[in-house]
Image (cartoon, rainbow, N blue to C red):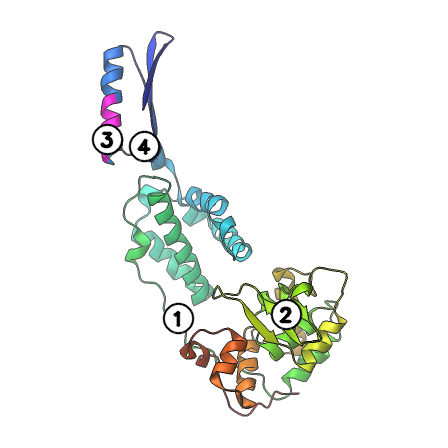
Amino acid sequence: MASIRKRNDLWQVQVRCRHAGSAAKSFHRKTDAERWATAQEALMQSGQWKDKKTNKHTIGDMMLRYLDVVTPSKRGKDQETRRLRRLLNDRRLMSVRLTQAKPCVFADFRDQRIQDGVRACQYDLVLLRHAWNIARIEWGWSLSDNPISLIRIPKNNPPRERRLKEGEFNLLKAAASKSRSWYVWPVVVLAIETAMRRGEILGLLWEHIDLDQRTAFLPMTKNGRSRQVPLSEAAIEQLSKAPKDTERPFPVTDVAMRQAWDKLRLRAGIHDLTFHDLRHEAISRMFDDGMKIHEVMAVSGHRTASQLFRYVQTFPNVGRR
């Protein structure tokens, strides 16, 4: 819809379209203004109109708007916010104008980012690819076909096969006794005893924990489903010591737990163990104890046996306390 008005001896035209955007221009003659408005409306209605303002947008502009508009509605918004803020600090990539963002630009970024790990590189490329699609389709930005879709995405590394080695449990326990982070050892024990992920443990609410029935309810998990987790004696013991005057047993941030875990590993002299390896340990222990596949899947939350078996290393558990 076009609006035309005379101001300061010029005819000012503004054409607006809900899906395409808006355009404005001034003319000395009203007939020229009307002719231009008609042409812009036709282009907008046919989908051929291009917003020249978007030519100035950079990758950084796109990712910042994605952070403000898209990320807040996601379940993993906290983790994605941290990832996007790190990405926004890459001035070399973020300063590139979208009109100059060719596949080779993202291939160069991929080759640099992969040095920080395959998963980190994959996550960043997926975010960039999704943001491009959102900007082009939902925001109406004048963009070419997605250049990230034209480059190779790094393949996953082979599944890790790391379990606790002989004596490592006691090394971690001894190191935890010297830690000022009271929560680090209880969280480690729960990870080993229940196969819960770090985020699931930190997100536990007292209202979903039944110490008498020995269960913890997770209303929303990574695969989008809820699940009930049985609690062992050791898990109950750790939860019983946690503060009861807070909404959560472990009212700490994911960042705080990551830092506490890294310090714990270093203090214990263990350098190649990740927190997620504790989930491998927990699931493998379940099979060591004779649990059936469907029973383990119910506890771990895996939807298929093939996903579950990536976590299973059933060699003798020398790391058990």
Q: Is residue 282 in sight in this rendering?
A: yes
Q: Which mark is residue 187?
A: none
Q: Nearer the viewer, residue 19 or 281?
A: 19
Q: Which mark is residue 156?
A: 1
Q: CA distance from mark 4 to mark 2?
A: 50 Å
Q: Nearer the viewer, residue 269 or 169?
A: 169
What crowding class fits label 2: few (fewer than 14 Cα within 10 Å), some (14-19), or many (20 or more)?
many
Q: CA distance from mark 1 to mark 4?
A: 40 Å
Foreground tag (2 vs 3): 3
What amino acid is found at the position of numbered circle 4 in the picture?
A: Lys
Location of residue 34 by image quarter: top left
Residue 31 place in picture, x, y as percent: 23, 12
Instruction: Give the residue at mark 3.
Output: 43
Q: Return the disc, 1 or 4, that comes first in the chain's sequence.
A: 4
Instruction: Give the residue at mark 4.
Output: 52
Location of residue 5 by image quarter: top left
Q: Return the disc, 1 or 3, that comes first in the chain's sequence.
A: 3
Q: Residue at x 50, y 44 (%)?
A: 68
Residues rendered magenta in the picture: 38-46
Name above or below for residue 244 compared with residue 311.
Answer: above
